[in-house]
Amino acid sequence: MLTLAAQGTDLALDDMVSLATLDYTSTAIGGTLTVSSTMVSLTTLTLGSASKLTTLTVSGTNMTTLTTAGVILNTNIVNNAKLATLDFGHTHLNGQLATTVDIINNAKLLALDMSTLGKVKAG
């Protein structure tokens, strides 16, 4: 398990192949978090309520649970075959352009509640 409580810059964790649980809170709206297929052990990602991300990308992982919070301007959740739970709790940042959300090819994900977002851009 890894907890990052005040990450201030972009983060890609591609080399952390044994990491199973990540609790992440960013402090900079310009930051990005990328979780990719190289993180084969990661099953749970939780974003803290104070998080501020420009982009969250979760792609091709073995993740089963993803919990978002805080502010995320662009969300890309793509090709996560085992993702069954997506607790979508983040919001839009007032004064910014509309939020984008791409939830694509996550076969076990059967429901999604995006009611926390007040402004979403149509694709």
Image: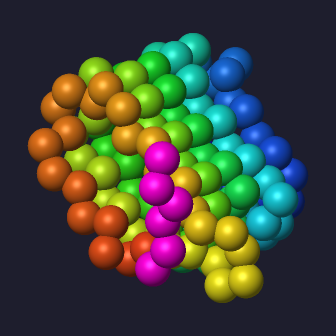
Residue 36 on image: x %, y %: 57, 24
Check the image and report above or below for 94 versus 15. below
- Identify the residue at horizontal 51%, vertical 35% (top origin): 58
Q: Does the magenta stretch include residue 120?
A: yes
**Residue displayed at 73% across by 83% down:** 95
Q: Which residue lies furthest to the bottom in this view?
A: 94
Identified at 73% across, 48% down, the residue is 32
Front-most of residues 75 and 40: 75
Residue 77 seen by the camera = yes
Figure colour scheme: rainbow
Q: In this view, does 56 lie above or below 7?
A: above
Q: Where is residue 102 in the image (x, y as percent from the top left)?
A: 45, 42
Q: Left of 114 or right of it: where is 112?
A: left
Image vertical order of residue 116 relative to residue 84, above or below:
below
Q: Nearer the viewer, residue 106 or 11?
A: 106
Which residue is found at the position 20% from the left and 27% from the top?
Answer: 107
Q: For residue 39, what is the image quadrant? A: top right
Residue 8 location, x and y as percent? 85, 59
- Residue 74 placement (x, y as % from top left): 60, 53
Q: Residue furthest left?
A: 110
Q: Is residue 94 magenta?
A: no
The region drawn magenta spans 118-123
